[in-house]
Amino acid sequence: MPALKPSIAAAVLLAGALSAPPALANPFETRLANGLRVIVKEDRRAPTAVHMVWYRAGSIDEKDGTSGVAHALEHLMFKGTRTLAAGEFNKRVAEAGGRDNAFTSRDYTAYFQIVPKAALPEMMQLEADRMANLKLDAKEFASEIKVVMEERRLRTDDNPQSLVHEAMNSAMFQAHPYRRPIIGWMDDLEHMTWQDARDWYRLWYAPNNAYVVVVGDVDHREVFRLAQKYYGVLKPHALPERKPQNEPEQVGIRRISVKAPAKLPYLAMAWKMPKLRDVQKDRDPYALEVLAAVLDGHDASRLAKNLVRGSRIAQSAGAGYDGTLRGEASFVLDGQPAEGKTVAELEAALRAELKRVQDEGVSAEELARVKTQSIASQVYKRDSLMAQAMEIGGTEAAGQSWRDIDTLLEKLKSVTADEVQAVARKYFKDDTLTVAVLDPQPIEQSKPRKPSVAVRH
Amino acid sequence: MRTLTVFLLSLLFSTLAMAGVRIQHWTAPSGAKVYFVETRVVPILDVQIDFAGGGVFVPAGKSGLAGLTRSMLEAGAADLDEEKIAGRLVDIGAHLGGGVDSDRASVSLRTLSEKLERDAAVDLMRTILSAPTFPQAVLDREKARSIASIREAETRPDAIAAKRFAAAIYPGHPYGTSPTAETVGAINRDDVVDFYRRHYGAQGAVVSIIGDVSRAEAEAIAQRLTEALPPGGASLVPPEVAKPVRATIKIDHPAAQSHVHVGLPAIRRTDPDYFPLLVGNYTLGGGGFVSRLMKEVREKRGYAYSVYSYFAPRKLEGPFEIGLQTKREQVGDALKVVDDVLGGFIAGGPTAKELAAAKKNLVDGFALRMDSNAKLLGYLSTIGFYGLPLTYLDDFPARVKAVTAEQVRAAFARHVKAENLVTVVVAAD
C-alpha cells in the first residue's frame, strides 16, 4: 500500500475509532424460532427510528408470464389485512408522525417506516400483521394494477434511457431472470390477476424468508422483545426451490438499438463479470469496484476529466460495477456523446480509456483517492439513519452479512494497482459485451404508443 | 417503488421544526449573516453560503446566467484550474454542492471535521468564492453542454410541462423564464463576471454552519469565507409578480402519458398564511397517501402513479401547484377529478378529522424533519435567507396546532382563486 498522506492517515484513524465503539458490539442480531432474523443498530442522535422489513423475493424469483408480480404485490401490501382496511396502513403511519414507503429490486422487496421512536412498536405490529394476514381481492387489484401500469409508463415507456436499459438487460441475459424488467412487461401487467399476486404472497412472504432492520434511538433488547411479541407468533413455511438459472457463456458481441423521442443519442456497454462470492478469499470483485471508482467515482475521476472536460467527446459519461447481488454481475460504461459527436466516437473513447488502464495501469494517487472517498463516505453515512439501515439491509440481501461491512471496506482498501490492471485486462472481452444505443427520433414525427390490448374499464 | 412523491413534497414545503436545536446567530465583520448549530455527534462539518443570486435577478435575454455563474466558480480560482480544484476536494474526502434556484445561489461544503481536512476544505471554498477566474475556454464548453441538455430537455414531456407552466403563471416575470439555446448562447464572459460581482458580495450573504466545531471556530470559518468577497450583494429587489388569467394550455407530444400541472403564483415565504396553507395542503395533496388527491385520483380510480400538491413559497409569490401524469386517453377524466377535489377543498376546507390528522402528522413528525445535519443545514439557510425568526423551529408545533379550519378556508380563498388558475397539459389527445 502506498504511504498515506497525513490528512488521509487522520481520516483512517478517525474512521477506525468510530467503527469500533468501546465495550459493546453494535449492531446486534437475533434469530427468532420461526427463522426471522432481527438486526438492530443503536444510534441515539435523534429521537427517531427506521424500521425495515426485507423479503428475499424480487424479480429474480419471477416466472415468464407474470413478470412484475413482485412489484405489484409491493403495491398491494398497502391494501389491507384481515383486520386493517385498505389505506389504513398509511393512515396509521401518518398519524404517528411518520413516513413510509417500499421498493422492489431484482433481488428483494423491502418496506420501511421512519417514525418518532415511540411509534416503533406499532410499526412492528403493523408489518407483522401484513406479513401473514394480507387480504387480496379482485376489486383492489383491478384498481392498483392500473397504478402500476401508470408507473411503468412514467418510469420506462416515456423514458428513453430506461427503454435502452430494459432492452439491454433482455439482450445480455437470455436464460438468467435478470433479463426481465422489475416493473414487468406491459403485456404481463395487462394479463396479471389477483390470484397471481396471491400466489406470490403465499410462496415468499414468510418469517423464514425475511429479516427486520431497525436503526435509531432504541435499546436492542427491547426491540428483540417486541420482535418476539409481534413477529414471533408467525408460522414459517417451506420456500420454493430456487434454481440457479445460470446464464450460458456469451460467445460474441451483441448490439441492439432502441428508437425513442429524444435529441441526444445514448450509449451503454455492459460486460459480464464475476460477482463477490467469498468475502475473504475473492480479489477480483474488489479490484473491479476500484476500477469503476477510478473511472467514475468522484469529481476528479477519469471519464469526467478526460471525456467530458478534456476531449469534450461526451456530454456525460459513467462507469458502474455492482458485485454484491444474488444474480449475475456486469460492468457498465455509458454516456451521451457531445453535440456534433457520434455514438461510435464515444464508444471508441470509452474503449480507449479501458485500454489505457490495460496498458498503463492506475497511479498510486488514484488508488489513494478511491480509498479516501470510501473512508469519508462511511463517516458521512452516519449522518443518516436511513443510509445506515439501507447499508445493512442491502448487504444482507446480496447474501453477505452486516458483519462483513467493515471487511468489505478493508478489502477495497487493500486492492493494488496491479490487481486493477489485471482485471481490466482479464474481463473486458468483446465476446461477453452487449452494446445498446438510443437512436433519437424527432418528437414531431413520433406517434403515441397505442395500448397493446383493449383498455379495461 | 410505491411512490416518489412523499419525500419530495416534504422538502418542497419544508417544515422547519425541532425543539432543543440551539441556533446561534451573528453578523461577521465582513457583513455576512451567520447561523450556527454546534453538534458533536458525528465528526463532520457542513457549511452553506447563500447569495441573492438566483434566476430572478438575471437580465432579460440572458436566462441561464445565474446557473452558469454558479457552476463556473468551480472552473478555476486563483492559481487553481478546474482539475486541481476537483483533485484537492477528492484528496481530503470533501464534497462541494449547491446550485441555483429562482431566488438563491448556493455553495455548500461537507467535510470531515478533523482540523487538517477542515482547514483545507474551508480554504478551497474561500478561494472559489473569492477568486474565481472564469476561464473563457471552460465557459465555452459549459455553454455548449448546457445548450445540449436544454435541447434534450425540450424533447421530454415532464420538462416541457414544467417550463410551460412556469411561463404561463409568471407572464413577463423572470420567475417564468427558463434558459433556452438562444439565451445561453447570448451569455458572454463579461456577463458572468458582472453577475458575480453584483450578487456574490458579503453584504447579502448568509452563512449556515452545522457540525463538529466550536463557536469560535465557526466565527473564524464564516469570516474566512466572506472577508474577500466582492463588494456587491446588498439590497437587491426583484420585480413584482402579477397574477395570471385563467387559461388551459395544451401541447402536442407523442408520450404515452399526459403531464398535467394546475396552479398559480401563491405566497411569499414570510406570508402570515404560511401555516394555514401548510396544514391545509397536507389534506389536499401534501400528505402523501392520506391526501384527498391521492385517494381520489390514485387509490379509488387508478388514474396516476404520482399526484400531489404543494406550495413553494419564495421571496416573492412562489407557486402553488397540483401535478400528475396519466395515460393520455384518460386525462380529461383525471382533470375532472382534480377540479372536483380542489373545488371541494376550497369551498369547504378540511373536516375536523382531517385537520386533526394533519396537525398530528406535522407536530409528531417534527423530529423526523430535523434528524440529520444535512436536513438542519437546509433549514438554517432557509431561516437565514428568508429572514425567518430565530425561534422559528421552537415555535413550529404551536403555530401548527393553532391553525383552525376557518383559517385554512380563508387562506385558500385568498391565495388559490379560480380566476387565476392555469392548467398545462403536455401530450393531450
Image (cartoon, rainbow, N blue to C red):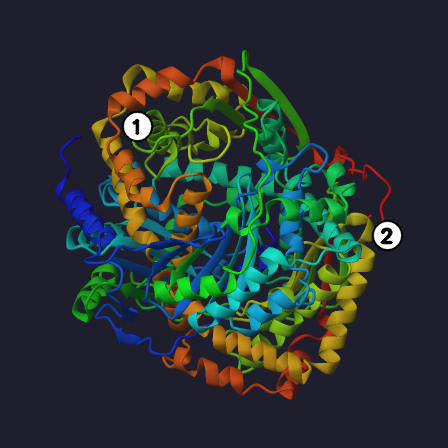
Contact between marks 1 and 2 (CB within 8 A): the answer is no
Q: What type is the residue that disc 1 sits on?
A: Lys
Q: Position of residue A359 (x, y in %)?
A: 31, 14
Q: CA distance from mark 1 to mark 2?
A: 56 Å
Residue drawn at (33%, 50%) of the image:
B96
Q: Mark 1 or mark 2: which is in front?
A: 1
B27 and A77: which is toward the camera: A77
Residue position marked by numbered label 2 in the rendering: A457
Q: What type is the residue that disc 2 sits on?
A: His
Q: Is residue B406 left or right of residue A307?
A: right
| Label 2 chain ID | A
* Local secondary structure at mark 2: loop
User: Which corner quadrant of the image does residue A448 belong to?
Assistant: top right
B346 and B359: which is toward the camera: B359
Q: Is residue B157 left or right of residue A249?
A: right
A297 and A51: which is toward the camera: A51
Q: Residues within 10 Å of mark 2 (few under 14, many from 20)?
A: few
The image's mark for residue A281 is 1
